[in-house]
Amino acid sequence: MNETVLKPSVVRVPISLGERSYQIHVGSGLIDEASSFEDLACGQSALIVSNETVAPLYLDRLVATLIKRHRMVHSLVLPDGEAHKHWITLNLVFDKLLQLQCDRKTVLYALGGGVVGDMTGFAAACYMRGVPFVQVPTTLLAQVDSSVGGKTGINHPLGKNMIGAFYQPLRVICDLDTLSTLPPRELSAGLAEVIKYGPIADMAFFDWIEANIDALMARDAATLAFAVKRSCEIKAWVVGQDERESGLRAILNFGHTFGHAIEAGMGYGAWLHGEAVGCGMVMAARLSHALGLVDQAFLSRLESLVQKAGLPVVAPVLDPHDNVGRYMELMRVDKKAEAGAIRFVVIDVPGQARLQAVPDELVAEVIGRSCTES
Amino acid sequence: MNETVLKPSVVRVPISLGERSYQIHVGSGLIDEASSFEDLACGQSALIVSNETVAPLYLDRLVATLIKRHRMVHSLVLPDGEAHKHWITLNLVFDKLLQLQCDRKTVLYALGGGVVGDMTGFAAACYMRGVPFVQVPTTLLAQVDSSVGGKTGINHPLGKNMIGAFYQPLRVICDLDTLSTLPPRELSAGLAEVIKYGPIADMAFFDWIEANIDALMARDAATLAFAVKRSCEIKAWVVGQDERESGLRAILNFGHTFGHAIEAGMGYGAWLHGEAVGCGMVMAARLSHALGLVDQAFLSRLESLVQKAGLPVVAPVLDPHDNVGRYMELMRVDKKAEAGAIRFVVIDVPGQARLQAVPDELVAEVIGRSCTES
């Protein structure tokens, strides 16, 4: 008697970018499924790039799946963490590709979080001026944020993500099972980006997150699945209208201007990106409030949700002698800055955001308040 | 009484690449002409990237012209030569851009030869994931080759141009006056790429070069102007059909597979790129002859013209113990290689080329013959 083999249910989110369109697959057990990768370009060789934390957990399984597709499946394990997202680590990928004599049809697979994804994507964009790559994000943050939009790159000592490329993957495979091994801090960091989609685009989703924050923190599979799917849909909707960030796309950086300053000021890796964004969203909401755009009630809701997600809401002091000055200096190299003027994503009305320049005095006041208040 | 100011005559070659289309201006005195840069995107600041050889000759003049357009015109002078076309030098550009807090609208100007153009273009492609750039090529090779097609990048110890991007400039300004200061070796190196366009696309142009080789070597302005214009037109025609080198564009690499092996094997900078290509074309023509595609008469014409252009026609011995093996090893990392098989641009009939895999024995024979014959 034949048993019906039930394939795990997979949700597919299409990302429409003309000839660079691709799909995000969201589901359980996808790393082990040959069908996750079917219909994709397939050179003779593959290089899986991962890190020392993720590789012991999932590398063998991905190799086992990919060896059915490629004649040779190589791997490279990088050191873990934002502190390694720089030229020297990136060059390890190029060294490996050239040592292996990988050609233009070699497929790169990014197995890990946002750092692995950003560096592997940038390596794919630059190696022989572009080879195909597939993202297999294993953190919530990477699944809901870095997997959509094609932003790749590395940090420079003077600024985060300052060197990079817009480069789209062939596909993104979000295996929800990988979230079970995520450290609590990283789960929270991912929730920061999930929460973000509410104030900038969809307050109904914000309501849903508020109602489900306990289930999300408890890693309930179905709840996480919806959070990932809806986040990717919203990001896809934004990116589809503005692939190269000439306008609307900038709203995805809500909380990121303050957040990048915190990350750079504390030294990359001290605060997780999501932690800095969580705190940065509260600061950006305060700025919106100071501009008279949103009311105190919205501010309190956001702060409370960020806190329930296990994220910091008190900003760090970056320089005891001139804290505001240090924040300003770090924010002036932000990619959204123009001619030295810092521009912020502010909440216009809850569910809608825009980019605008803000007087330095107002920014200074918010920084001062955020570093002492809870 | 008003005098009529005669503007220098400028030839404009349009490069049609959809929204990435741009123009090449060819003429005399263009560096000093504000009109060379009119109608271009224009941020508050500009960074001119040049090298230690070219900067003393033309940097001040370009600054004087650009200061009418940008509020701030910065410059960065890099060490000269192919040996510096790597990460470390590229990072100097990023360091400078970030130290100056340059934003996304900053325009990069590449003032120099192919190395400056390739590195500046790649820096522009990657800085904040893309800022505008303008090419001001000052060598014949850069004017007829690197100025069309958007190939940017750097070398890796294991291969030339292995890391880079396709990235189009806003405009290319070929000021023919800059060719007057070119060392004789560099003039010859540029002529290699001019000659190349004959066998691969236009034998009437080849006839013209043969008839005018003495005037070209004597740097006659009108003759050089036509050579630059016609070369750009042919390259534009090829690139317009295949921007990302999936097919036809590969023919532009005639002579380059052998040439890259010579450059890498001798150590970047020992042979100029054009010198290696000149010798490489003779080798590739011999390969075409060995395949029965072209006759001895064509081979002799090409070899004679390459020699008259002041270029080497005897290939260097790269390894006295296993010369053929060393050539093969270096050619296997060529970007046109697929699954370990080296592919060569061969001349099908004079004026028409194609890419094809060639048996190793035949390649070995041509290498052996080319390293001893003149």
Image (tube, coloured by chain):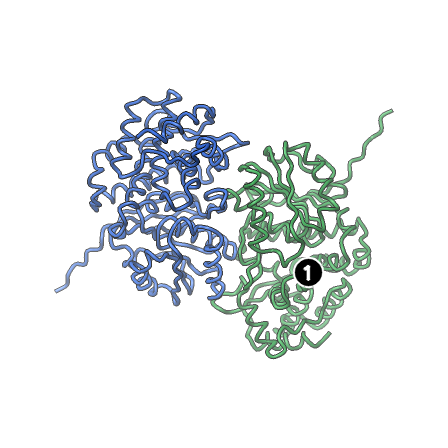
Chain colours: A green, B blue
Place of residue A201 in the rendered image (x, y in percent of width and height, measured from the top left):
65, 58
The part of the image, by quadrant, that contains residue B78 is: bottom left
In depth, the one of B131 and A69 nearer the eye is: A69
Disc count in the image? 1
Is residue B206 visible from the viewing direction of this image?
Answer: yes
Query: For the residue carrying disc 1, how many other residues have a C-alpha within 10 Å: few (<14), some (14-19), or many (20+)?
Result: many
Quarter of the rendering occupied by the N terminus of chain B = bottom left
Spot occupied by residue B20 in the image (x, y as percentages of width and height)? 43, 47
Identify the element where label 1 is drawn. helix
The answer to which image quadrant residue A170 occupies is: top right
Q: Residue furthest front?
A: B321
| Residue holding disc 1 | A274
Horizontal side, residue A209 vs residue A269: left or right? right
Q: Is residue A34 above or below residue A289?
A: above
Task: Look at 47% across and 63% down and name the residue there.
Answer: B102
> On the picture, is A160 further left or further right than B352?
right
**The residue marked by circle 1 belongs to what chain?**
A
Whether residue B146 is situated above or below residue A345 in the rendered picture: above
- Furthest residue in direction right, as rendered: A1
Figure quadrant of the C terminus of chain B: top left
Q: Would residue A22 be visible to someone looking at this image?
A: no
Q: Nearer the viewer, residue B70 or A186?
A: A186
Residue A216 placement, left or right of B339:
right
- The residue at 65%/42% (across/down) is A75
Residue farthest top in this picture: B292
Q: Position of residue B245 (x, y in %)?
A: 46, 37
Residue A38 vs residue B264: left or right? right
Residue at image point 33% right, 35% down: B196
Q: Position of residue A374 (x, y in %)?
A: 73, 74
Q: Nearer the viewer, residue B209 or B242?
A: B209
Q: Amino acid at mark 1?
A: Gly
